[in-house]
Image (cartoon, rainbow, N blue to C red):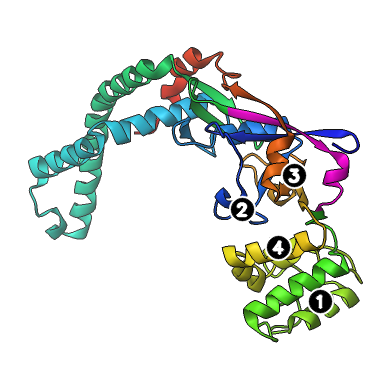
Amino acid sequence: MDGRDRTLYRGDAEAVDRFDCARTGEGALFGMGIYLTDSREIALDYCLKSSGTVVFRDEEAPSPRALVAAYLSHIVTTETDWKERLEAVRRDWTARYYGQNMHALPDEERERAKADVNAGYRKAMRAEASAYLRRAKDVFRSRRGGLCVVRDTLGQFSLVRKDGGGFLSRFAVPAGYLGRTLHGDRPLPDDALAAVSALMRGVYGDGVADFRNADEVGMRFDDWVESYRRRGFRYAWTERRVGGRGENPSLDVVWNGTHAGISAFDRRDVQAALVASLRGLGYVGIAYDGGVRLAGTGPRGGGGHRHDAFVLWDDDAVNGFRTGVERVVRDDMEEGLELNLRAAAVGMRF
């Protein structure tokens, strides 16, 4: 290993014997590669991204108490015959007092009939609700020993299985190696820009029908780049100012900020061709600013947890950099669940 090492992390729901670029998930930000981060917290979040680990998530829940209340409501509506009982009670009250022809009544009488039915319906359901809440609590308690509440880096709460967890891999990557990455959030060097330009022309021909900026539509790729160099432009996708005047666009601007880039680089064959071209220029992967694309998206006004992220392409090198793996279980917010359970009925809506 050359130079000083930098510690990076990766979180997976399952144990991985050997990392493989070809197994990159669909929709990865910069396509195929092995994604690493310098943030242990971010990597721990990825340990939980498995349906077998996360039991329940409510992105809008502002507290563990609200999350448990939402889970109890979820149990009632999905694991009991609650919805069927709602309709049965409504039908019963309607048939008992107004028969099946309430809608044939005169307007004023029909509205009065609806009010009477709804009042009776609410009264009946209040009697039913306590029984269903008891059943929901019983279901929750039966799972209580294996559940905990976890708060992720976006501030969102999830109920997870304590025996689910995941696997956190640690890597010692030479700083010199990371210095050979192409930074996806900075202006593209001319050699990388030429490679991207060639790929775009290969996909779309000499003209690109859907590259656009704030002023023009249907520009050729090279004209679009020259326009950006002269005066900067706005993201076609988000319409926010990026980059600077007189600079090459970044890979993120081309890839994720234009319709043509998204369409082209969504294809695995184009991704593979880009990796081959950039590796031929001496690049080993892509570095990018993690968390900046999530800024302001948290449900309670939070944003992305900023971190340095990397997409590396050499499977053998990355596997050689791994220095250890640990089994992790997230139970850092278990305290107070019983109190949350007793108070959760306050947040339930029947």
The percent coordinates of residue 265 (x first, y second) are: 63, 66
Mark toward the start of the polypeptide (2 vs 3) = 2
- Residue contact at pointers 2 and 1, CB within 8 angstroms: no
Kind of residue at badge 4: Ala
The 10 Å Cα crowd at callout 3, few under 14, some 14 to 19, many 20 or more, is: many
Mark toward the start of the polypeptide (2 vs 1) = 2
Q: Is residue 19 magenta?
A: no
Kind of residue at badge 3: Ala
- Left or right, residue 115 beside residue 287: left
- The alpha-carbon separation of the residues under discs 4 and 1 comes to 22 Å
Pointer 2 residue: 28
The percent coordinates of residue 67 (x first, y second) are: 50, 29
Q: Residue at x 70, y 48 (%)?
A: 314
- The alpha-carbon separation of the residues under discs 3 and 4 comes to 21 Å
Image vertical order of residue 217 relative to residue 190, above or below: below
Pointer 3 residue: 309
- The disc placed on residue 225 is 1
Residue 174 or 168: which is nearer the viewer? Answer: 174
Q: Report the magenta residues as a range.
A: 167-181
- The alpha-carbon separation of the residues under discs 2 and 3 comes to 13 Å
Q: Residue at x 54, y 23 (%)?
A: 149
- Label 3 SS: strand
The percent coordinates of residue 104 (x first, y second) are: 12, 59
Q: Quadrant of residue 131?
A: top left
- The disc placed on residue 276 is 4
Mark toward the start of the polypeptide (2 vs 4) = 2
- Label 2 SS: loop
